[in-house]
Image (spheres, rainbow, N blue to C red):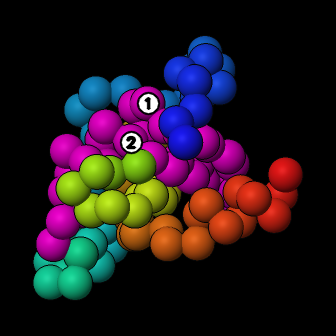
Amino acid sequence: MRRSRSSRRRRPGEGVRAGVKIHPYFRRRVLENPKRFRITVNVCEAIAADPYRSEVQEDGRFCYWGYVCGIGYYVRVIVLEDGETLFNAFEDRNFTRRQRRQG
């Protein structure tokens, strides 16, 4: 079942601006990891710019989720406190289950 576009809109100021920076951890753990070959900078940038869901972690980092058709899962993108540095990204296979439990 597809949700309406209005339920996915982010608040003004949310999301990452164009021209993201890449943290060395992101390069090492995501881009150079053969298990995450489907997750690219472009995918992460698109998710962070227009997330399905977003929240702020306790440490001040931003979490953005977005569905990627080519992967078949939701991808969670972690962005540092500055709002423009990609720190981590991975397939979040439990996202829909967690959403149902939360309401």
Amino acid type, callout 2 = Ile
The secondary structure type at the circle numbered 2 is helix
Q: Circle 2 sits on which residue?
A: 47
For residue 18, side relative to residue 78 (left or right): left
Instruction: Return the x and y of residue 78 as percentages of the image width and height.
Output: 48, 57
Amino acid type, callout 1 = Asp
How crowded pointer 2 is (Cα within 10 Å; few <14, some 14-19, many 20+) is rated as many
Q: Quadrant of residue 10?
A: top right
Instruction: Return the x and y of residue 43 as percentages of the image width and height.
Output: 25, 48
82, above or below 17, in the image:
below
- Tell me where the magenta segment starts and ends, as one range: 37-66
How crowded pointer 1 is (Cα within 10 Å; few <14, some 14-19, many 20+) is rated as some
Q: Which quarter of the rendered picture does the N terminus lie within?
A: top right
Instruction: Return the x and y of residue 82 as percentages of the image width and height.
Output: 50, 42
Instruction: Return the x and y of residue 24 as percentages of the image width and height.
Output: 27, 69
Q: Circle 1 sits on which residue?
A: 50
Q: Which residue: 61% across, 18% down?
A: 6
Q: Nearer the viewer, residue 20 or 47?
A: 47
Q: Which residue: 18% across, 66% down?
A: 38
For residue 55, side relative to residue 92 (left or right): right
